[in-house]
Image: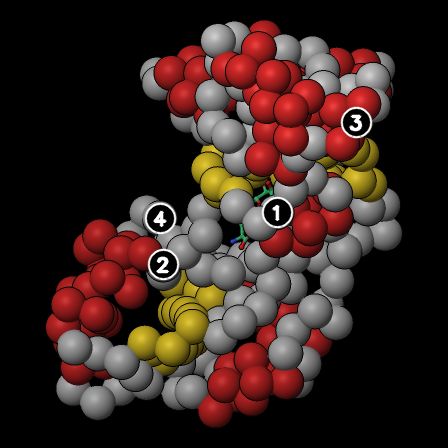
Amino acid sequence: MLYVVPTPIGNLEDITLRALRILKEVPLILAEDTRTSRRLLDHYGISTPLRAFHAHNEHTVVDRIVAELAAGGTMALVSDAGTPGISDPGFLLVRACVQAGVRVECLPGPTAFVPALVASGLPCDTFQFDGFLPHKKGRQTRLKYLAELPHTFVLYESPYRLVKCLGELVTVCGPDRRACVARELSKMFEEIKTASLQEILAHFGAKEVKGEIVVVVAGKPYRPPFTCIPRIRRLSFRHCPMSLSPQPFYYSTKKFVE
Ligand code: SAM
């Protein structure tokens, strides 16, 4: 049995009672960085042994771990922060467990993109999480693809590349697209700035950016095809009393608004 256990992304209080119990009860915890996880466990008085499981060894150790689990073992998997598998090691192991018929339970818990998305105030009914953009090859292709999405998208970004990333987003999405930068979520210097991409770029371009960053960008606003507009106007004048208002009908219905 494998438990995937989310851990705090900043504030140490953000860990569930169940996560603490599982981390205490399992005989072994697989950890992205054993020193980071040991500090967290020490904070909660948990002395469970740790074994390294990270991006540099996951391919070589995954088969052995699955064999131990398939033979009846139980382990928990943690990453440095947040939910394993979300821009962190975990997918490879979970997929191998599922394929081998090993039971996997992922506990609900902290992850950075959810509070960023919700606190941004941008539409969160439909969204795309895209993690880190490629640094070089494929970056522009990805940005152009994201810019055309009709729904909100979410990126992880390093503080050193934030201003460059915002500049690229202004180029592909336009300066007026609504966006949000959520910095240092759940920590002392948490900052959530929602504005146009241009305004956000000016804000973060004017100072040294520190801390951990999530970028949330609203989807491309829907523009009715040019040929539809006269027809919708005609419809509105014939059938809708709101057509007497100075705003055309297609602005007054949710269907045609972003
Ligand atoms: N597994 C984590 C999760 O579930 O969100 C993500 C790990 S990924 C290696 C680290 C990235 O997550 C950071 O570079 C940043 O983009 C984002 N992140 C993590 N903690 C954050 C925080 N407290 N505030 C803002 N972003 C954070």
Q: Name the residue under label 3.
A: 195
Q: Which residue is drawn at 54% across and 15% down?
A: 231
- Report the disc number at residue 67: none
The quarter holding residue 204 reads: top right
Compare marks 4 and 3 and give the one earlier in the sequence.
Answer: 4
Q: Name the residue under label 1.
A: 124
Q: Are marks 4 and 1 in contact (CB under 8 Å)?
A: no
Q: Are marks 4 and 2 in contact (CB under 8 Å)?
A: no
Q: Name the residue under label 2.
A: 90
Compare marks 4 and 2 and give the one earlier in the sequence.
Answer: 4
Q: Name the residue under label 4.
A: 55
Q: Which residue is drawn at 79% across and 53% down?
A: 187
Compare marks 1 and 3 and give the one earlier in the sequence.
Answer: 1
Q: Where is residue 87 in the image (x, y as percent from the top left)?
A: 45, 46
Compare marks 4 and 1 and give the one earlier in the sequence.
Answer: 4
Check the image and name the residue furthest to the front.
Answer: 238
Compare marks 3 and 2 and give the one earlier in the sequence.
Answer: 2
The quarter holding residue 245 reads: top right
| Label 3 beta carbon less than 8 Å to ligand 1 | no
